[in-house]
Image (cartoon, rainbow, N blue to C red):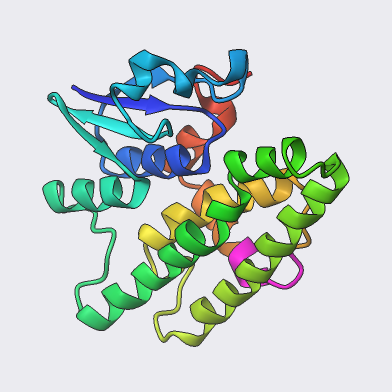
Amino acid sequence: MLKLYDFFRSSAAYRVRIALRLKKLDYQHLPIHLTKDGGHQFSPSYRAVNAQARVPTLDVDGTILTQSLAIIEYLDETHPQPAFLPSDAIGRAQARAMALLIACDIHPINNLAPLTYLKDKMGQDEEAVKTWYRHWVETGLVALETLVTSQPRKGDFCMGERPGIADICLVPQIFNARRYKSDLSGCPTLVKIDAACNALPEFAAAAPDRQPDAS
């Protein structure tokens, strides 16, 4: 069985949970708490699994995979249905651009590590950290709104009538944006897509508050 090293509130791990649910793949949940006791991800036992000390990590019969988008594309290649990417090259490039906008441009500068550094090392108070977070999330989501609305595949989801890799990345980012009370008025299409995704049982089951380690 697949083994997923996970933290219920991690955006990157959330993406992989959605992907696993959409592919209807069973997996063993192995929680790694990112804040308790200084962060369980820094333990020697977990560093031996993932040298970057981050989640998610997917153990595939003893082979370790890291980085959420790499894991998601692995799952798509090994379990082709339902497909996470369009069948044409242009569509695949557009879908990957949307996913990467979130995973590479928005998420990294709002991840736990940089937010903690801003507070603990740079002396920023909690409100300053939240302001930083909201600025980059709102800026990125407004740009993503334009990408989604300007491409020709229309429907309930980012690339048409079924959820794919862009939606898998979008839902966790919207969840976190709401946690930090971000202004989502600049991305009404994304808000509608998020609602359509969360109406599906696979997305609902992957939500943070539905995880065994939720606290």
Image vertical order of residue 175 relative to residue 214, above or below: below
Number of marks in the image?
0
Q: Is residue 34 left or right of residue 200?
A: right
Q: Is residue 73 above or below residue 10?
A: below
Quarter of the image where one finds residue 34 = top right
Front residue of 49 and 174: 49
Q: Is residue 215 magenta?
A: no
Quadrant of the frame with the N terminus = top left
Task: Depth check: give the residue in front, 14 or 104.
Answer: 104
Residue 185 visible in the snapshot: yes
Q: Residue at x 36, y 70 (%)?
A: 95
Q: Is residue 163 visible?
A: no
Report the side of 37 relative to 206 (left or right): right
Kindly indicate the quadrant of the structure image that contains residue 2. Answer: top left
* Percent position of residue 116, x then y: 67, 37
Residue numbers of the magenta segment:
184-191
Q: Quadrant of residue 83?
A: bottom left
Q: At which x and y percent is residue 4?
A: 32, 27
Left or right placement of residue 190 versus residue 64 in this view:
right
Residue drawn at (50%, 79%), measured in percent from left and top? Answer: 147
Image height of 150 relative to 211, above or below: below
- Residue at the spot 46% in from the left edge and 22% down from the top edge: 42
Quadrant of the snapshot with the C terminus: top right
Q: In x, y percent, where is residue 151?
A: 44, 84
Q: Residue at x 35, y 68 (%)?
A: 96
Residue 190 part of the magenta segment = yes
Against 40, residue 130 (above or below) is below
